[in-house]
Amino acid sequence: MERLWSPTAQGDVGELSAIQWLGSVGAHIFVPLGHSPDYDLVVERDACLHRVQVKTSTCWSRGRFVVALCTRGGNQSWNGVVKRLDATRCDYLFVHVGDGRRWFIPARALGGGSAIALGGPKYAEFEVERGTPLLSREASSE
């Protein structure tokens, strides 16, 4: 599948997508100063603060979008450490995938795996309205 953006730019688009959707449902959004390894945004909804990790994916396999929930190092060479998304360090996962579909999933619903597959029934209740596709029209129809 063709990408429209570099991985960094795609991540930025995901964060903007999360900000847009969260704002549309009345949340107050705060962006942490500096880089947080556990969450990308803090939102206030219903008088509570929630930490939100944002992910994007254009990885299509077996009729679903596969979303990595772990990191294997950074931009430098991998040191062998795998860091999984931890439900004690963030409250929600916001995901934006290649065809524009988006989810807002409570972290406690994720389990402890290194990836999830979206587009089937398991996380359907957490799907929110579509955003802008991450893929070109030609690539998304493959």
Image: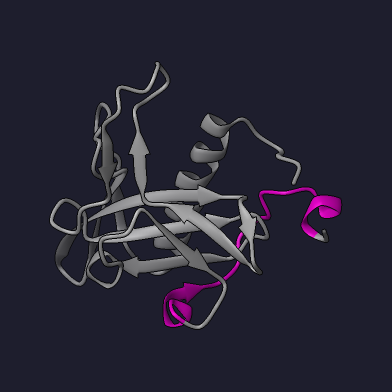
The residue shown at (37%, 25%) is: 74
- For this orientation, the residue located farthest to the right is 138
Quarter of the rendering containing residue 7: top right
The answer to if 12 sits in the magenta stretch is no
The residue shown at (57%, 39%) is: 10
The residue shown at (25%, 61%) is: 112
* Boundaries of the magenta span: 122-140
In this view, the residue in front, 12 or 141, is: 141
Q: Is residue 73 visible?
A: yes
Quadrant where the C terminus sits is bottom right
Quarter of the rendering containing residue 25: bottom left
Whether 129 is drawn above or below 58: the answer is below
Q: Is residue 15 left or right of residue 53?
A: right
Q: What count of labels does the image hold? A: 0
Horizontal and vertical percent position of residue 20: 48, 55
Q: Is residue 95 left or right of residue 83?
A: right
Horizontal and vertical percent position of residue 138: 86, 52
The residue shown at (61%, 30%) is: 6
Quarter of the rendering containing residue 4: top right
- For this orientation, the residue located farthest to the front is 80
- Coloration mode: one colour
Q: Is residue 19 left or right of residue 65?
A: left
Whether 27 is drawn above or below 34: the answer is below
The answer to if 128 sits in the magenta stretch is yes
In this view, the residue in front, 88 or 101, is: 88
In this view, the residue in front, 102 or 117, is: 117
Horizontal and vertical percent position of residue 88: 13, 56
Q: Is residue 23 visible?
A: no
Horizontal and vertical percent position of residue 97: 58, 56
Whether 94 is drawn above or below 14: the answer is below
